[in-house]
């Protein structure tokens, strides 16, 4: 059963009434001035996310996904447009948004439990309270028994789970993730996807995932937004009507394959443009 | 999913011994003993002139004598105290200065090269100036040690702070840390390995200069003893006293490493 998909970016959130929107990204553009001129990384991007919804943004390398992540997360302030959380405009980082980064971001000098308790420590929670909360989230990401280990003793996947638990411990209304499993192998990525889905379904966590991985996007999301290659615009929104609760077994279903094929059609065109663009830039540089 | 990595897996073929800290220490001690043995053989074989370098066995025999006759333990304590003060000054002044240069960009651009040049300057030759300012006292010795070790502490602190991974700072920003929290909770702990490299280098420079100035101005400590023994041409005693300088250096280096492991666990 394939869901409806919308062709135009404006329709990416058409179904959501203003009250039903938790995150609103309105006409966001970002330009960078470089030696080669002005580059538009993100161009007039608008979408909304409802509470409890899992949305993925997928696009080829260089389409401005990470720029969008940084804008929504409040790490980039200088852009056109508006980002709001429940009507509150995001200026700088926002307490309602928790971020999980692509790069390994655990603190190597802190144990797992100390890492996860970090946002609670900053919030001034008592030692006992933060320990209890941290242990709760450690168990949630499946790392019980590793509380006293340091990140150097863990695998890449385990470290990313620590980073995820740390962000969850701050109890954000919106979980914002930038390709958190990009550095992991496919099997690990699928299994961690299961874990993320479990957590998302348990906490009814509103989630925005930035990814370039098609399988991951379809496996996890309620809606996939496809971005164009530079300048990064929203090309299409695809509703994923795969059954819930969902796990990685869904990847073997026909419906899953249809969604992947459907999104790939759009993505292929953009990825090819990206490759052609890279090649022509290399040739240009050699010509000079 | 690959799980945890043990220390032994990471150390390779030497894993059974080198995996433990004790094993590493044993290998270090064995290497030192082997080198001493080689020197003994080289001197006995006439490869090294024994009128310039005494036999290690003679040095070993001289140590009880200098302990009893030359009051070496008291002098060792004097030099160690000077080193202690110099290291406290190095940490207390050098680290904040490095942090200041990191924080104030214009100051960094203006001063970094000068601080680098200070690292190469032969500070010990300026001892007459220090004598004029601080008099013939332990303060002069401490201040020269401090001045000699300052540059690496500042530069490595700056390097460590500037080299903090952006993603860690972004994590701090995402949790809305104040600038002070960002410094104490993320920047400083992340920079500690580099800060300690600077401190250890600073300690080495300070030690060389402290003993050198004690020698030059003939004031207290192991440097003065080395001077006296050398003038008496008591070579085994001179080298025995040098052993105590090395011991003092080892004590400080080891303490710095222990402090680093305490402050920055998990490496």
Image (cartoon, rainbow, N blue to C red):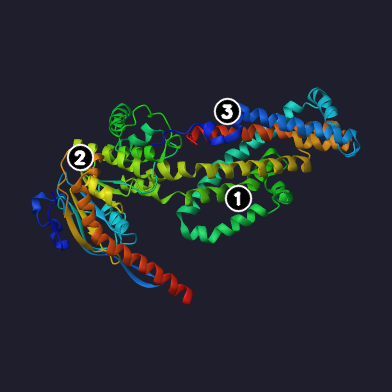
Image location of residue A179, percent across then percent down: 32, 49
Q: Kindly report the distance in space between the C-alpha atoms of the residues bearing marks 2 and 1.
A: 59 Å
Asked if marks 2 and 1 touch (Cβ < 8 Å), the reply is no
- Residue A96 in view in this figure: no
Please tell me which of labels 1 and 3 falls first in the chain: 3
Vertical order, A66 against B252 (above or below):
below
Q: Secondary structure at mark 1?
A: helix
Q: Residues within 10 Å of mark 2 (few under 14, many from 20)?
A: some
Chain bearing mark 1: B
Q: Looking at the rendering, which quadrant does residue B39 occupy? A: top right
Q: Residues within 10 Å of mark 1 (few under 14, many from 20)?
A: many
The residue carrying mark 1 is: B151
The residue carrying mark 3 is: B20
Have a look at marks 1 and 3 and say if they share a chain.
yes
Image location of residue B105, percent across then percent down: 47, 58
Image location of residue B132, percent across then percent down: 71, 48
Q: Nearer the viewer, residue A91 or A161?
A: A161
Asked if marks 1 and 3 touch (Cβ < 8 Å), the reply is no
Vertical order, A116 against A102 (above or below):
above
Residue drawn at (65%, 31%), measured in percent from left and top?
Answer: B251
- B237 vs B161, left or right, is right
Chain bearing mark 2: A
Q: Looking at the rendering, which quadrant does residue A10 occupy? A: bottom left
The residue carrying mark 2 is: A246
């Amino acid at each position: 059963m394939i869901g409806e998909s919308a062709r135009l970016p404006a329709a990416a959130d058409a179904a959501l009434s203003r009250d039903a929107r938790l995150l609103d990204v309105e006409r966001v553009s970002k330009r960078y001035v470089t030696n080669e001129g002005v580059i538009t990384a993100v161009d007039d991007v608008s979408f909304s996310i409802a509470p409890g919804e899992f949305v993925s943004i997928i696009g080829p390398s260089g389409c401005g996904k990470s720029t969008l992540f940084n804008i929504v997360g409040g790490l980039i302030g200088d852009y056109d447009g508006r980002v709001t959380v429940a009507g509150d405009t995001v200026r700088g980082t926002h307490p309602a948004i928790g971020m999980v980064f692509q790069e390994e971001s655990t603190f190597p000098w802190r144990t797992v439990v100390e890492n996860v308790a970090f946002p609670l420590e900053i919030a001034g929670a008592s030692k006992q309270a933060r320990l209890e909360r941290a242990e709760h989230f450690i168990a949630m990401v499946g790392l019980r028994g590793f509380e006293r280990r340091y990140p150097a003793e863990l695998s890449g996947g385990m470290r990313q789970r620590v980073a995820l638990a740390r962000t969850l411990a701050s109890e954000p209304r919106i979980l914002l993730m930038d390709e958190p499993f990009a550095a992991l192998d496919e099997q690990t990525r699928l299994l961690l996807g299961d874990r993320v889905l479990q957590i998302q379904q348990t906490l009814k966590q509103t989630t925005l995932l930035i990814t370039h991985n098609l399988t991951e996007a379809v496996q996890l999301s309620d809606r996939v937004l496809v971005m164009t290659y530079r300048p990064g615009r929203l090309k299409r929104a695809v509703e994923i009507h795969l059954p819930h609760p969902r796990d990685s077994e869904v990847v073997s279903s026909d419906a899953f394959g249809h969604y992947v094929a459907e999104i790939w059609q759009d993505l292929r065109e953009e990825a090819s443009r990206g490759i052609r663009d890279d090649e022509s830039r290399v040739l240009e540089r050699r010509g000079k | 999913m690959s799980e945890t990595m043990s220390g032994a897996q990471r150390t390779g073929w030497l894993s059974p011994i080198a995996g433990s800290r004790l094993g590493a220490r044993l290998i270090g001690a064995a290497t030192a003993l082997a080198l001493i043995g080689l020197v003994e053989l080289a001197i006995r074989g006439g490869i090294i002139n024994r009128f310039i370098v005494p036999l290690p066995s003679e040095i070993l025999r001289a140590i009880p004598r200098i302990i009893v006759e030359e009051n070496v333990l008291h002098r060792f304590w004097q030099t160690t105290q000077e080193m202690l003060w110099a290291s406290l000054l190095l940490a207390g002044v050098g680290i904040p200065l490095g942090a200041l240069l990191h924080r104030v960009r214009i100051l960094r651009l203006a001063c970094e090269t000068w601080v680098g040049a200070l690292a190469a300057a032969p500070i010990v030759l300026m001892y007459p100036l220090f004598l004029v300012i601080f008099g013939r006292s332990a303060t002069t010795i401490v201040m020269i040690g401090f001045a000699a070790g300052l540059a690496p502490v500042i530069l490595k602190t700056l390097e460590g702070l500037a080299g903090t991974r952006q993603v860690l700072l972004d994590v701090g920003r995402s949790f809305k840390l104040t600038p002070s929290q960002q410094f104490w909770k993320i920047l400083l702990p992340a920079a500690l390995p580099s800060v300690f490299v600077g401190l250890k280098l600073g300690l080495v420079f300070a030690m060389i200069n402290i003993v050198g100035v004690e020698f030059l101005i003939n004031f207290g400590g192991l440097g003065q003893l080395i001077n006296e023994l050398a003038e008496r041409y008591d070579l085994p005693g001179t080298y025995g006293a040098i052993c105590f300088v090395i011991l003092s250096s080892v004590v400080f280096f080891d303490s710095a490493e222990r402090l680093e492991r305490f402050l920055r666990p998990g490496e």
